[in-house]
Image (spheres, rainbow, N blue to C red):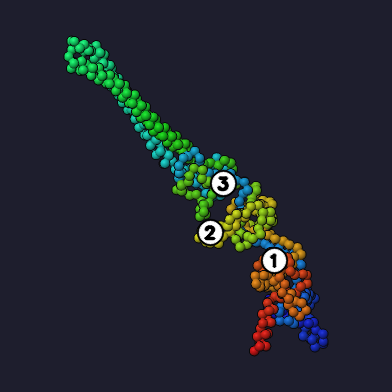
Amino acid sequence: MSGSCQTASPLPTTTRDRRKWTVYPRESAPASLAIVSLTLVSLLSCHGANDSVPIYVVQPINFSRRVTADGNLKARKATPLSAPTDAQGPLKIAWVANDGTLLKKDDLVVRFDPTEFETALVNGREDHDTAVNKLTKTVGESAMTRKNLGRDARQAEDELAAAKRFNFDDAEVFSRYQRIESELDQRLAGEKRTHANNVMGVREQLSRTDRDLVGIESKKADLKIRNAQQGLHALELRAPYDGILVLQRDWRGDVPRVGATVWSGSPIGEIPDLSTMKAEVFVLEADAAGIAVGQKARVALESNSSVTYGGKISQIDKLARPRIRGVPVQYFGVTLDLDRTDPIVMKPGARVRAVLEVENRTNAFSIPRQALFEKNGKKMVYVKRKDRFTPSEVTIGTSSPGRVVVTRGVAKGDALALTDPTKKEDEKEDKSGK
């Protein structure tokens, strides 16, 4: 009740008053009883109506808080369909089945464009041929270098042998110049032999390194060929068993289309098991207080709102997020497990509306929100004691848009002011002062 509370007119007591009342036929008796009942309720709720402050009498009642949410149906179990993991690199969709297509086992779901893999296969084979040619060239050059260095080493060995055979070391026969020249020839021939052997070892190491590098290039080419061949063998994605195709939607709400690029292992869709369904609904962030796993819910399809299905909350998102890009309103995602599934009418993606039973209390002191006031940071109500209103601090348990549950501070039968009585007294004092 809001505003000044007025009681209904009293029943007629005199003959003149009786003439003012209309005599209803027997069929209108229920309506008359309803009017009398409303009159009695008004008298009970507004006793003290002669006062200018309307009141509410506290009575224990059943208090329930329900939150509405909307969302879509989704299968509890589903087989995901992903881009082939055998294919390395991006995949371009060349053909895709429509969302909601009824599939049979081994039916084609997605076909990918082979152009990238065909090009990679050609490049890989060319790189492999190039590596083979490089290896042949490296092996030939190494053999030629080894042959030349071996010939130089043998020539140096022959020169050293000749220098030792014709050694001019007799001082009585040969001059000092001849002896020095013969010694230098021997030393030079020995250095040539050592140098030739050392160069042969270095050239052999360089040749081995070149062959290893060419081998790496050959392996890279082989890997490119193998990846291209695997990609060409994984260009088609087929249904593993009978079912309905449900394509994966991105953050924009779009499904995979022809020309779109996906990566290896990226989700494309799923084939749900229609025997058991669940509902994924979204609750406004402002209404999400008190929602917990295990609470009951009622779910109705938008296509047939007359039939409801029971369920329980099985999962709640940890963080709120917007449902529509660019709209700052945030929601908590809530998953509901349904008590039963009707595969005939329940299809994945069907829109549903749910009512979540967040709280249900019996014998609770639920008062109108108008009876609750805040003074100096404290919650309080004004209780009528005889002809005055006394402030009483209260403790709030929970609330709904129009009601507040009080857990401490009021008792059964208390008459609470629905407007601030202190303002009425202040107005009277102002008028009397004037």
- Quadrant in which residue 425 is drawn: bottom right
- Quadrant in which residue 412 is drawn: bottom right
| Residue placed under numbered mark 2 in the picture | 324
Say what amino acid the circle numbered 2 marks.
Answer: Ile
Q: Depth check: 54 or 432 in front?
A: 432
Q: Position of residue 413 (x, y in %)?
A: 78, 72
Question: Given contact means CB atoms under 8 Å apart, are the residues at marks 3 and 2 in contact?
Answer: no
Residue 244 visible somewhere in the drawing: yes
Q: Quadrant of the N terminus?
A: bottom right
Q: Nearer the viewer, mark 2 or mark 1?
A: 1
Q: What residue is at 73 percent from the left and 67 percent from the top?
A: 408
Q: Tell me which label, 1 or 3, sits earlier in the chain.
A: 3
Q: Nearer the viewer, mark 3 or mark 2?
A: 2
Say what amino acid the circle numbered 3 marks.
Answer: Glu
Helix, strand or loop at mark 3: strand
Locate residue 208 relative to residue 112 in the image: left or right. Answer: left
Helix, strand or loop at mark 1: strand
Q: What residue is at 26 percent from the left and 16 percent from the top?
A: 160
Instruction: Give me the C-alpha separation between circle 1 and circle 3.
Output: 48 Å
Locate residue 191 relative to residue 248 in the image: left or right. Answer: left
Residue 302 visible somewhere in the drawing: no
Q: Depth check: 72 or 240 in front?
A: 72
| Label placed on residue 396 | 1
Q: What residue is at 43 percent from the left and 41 percent from the top?
A: 114
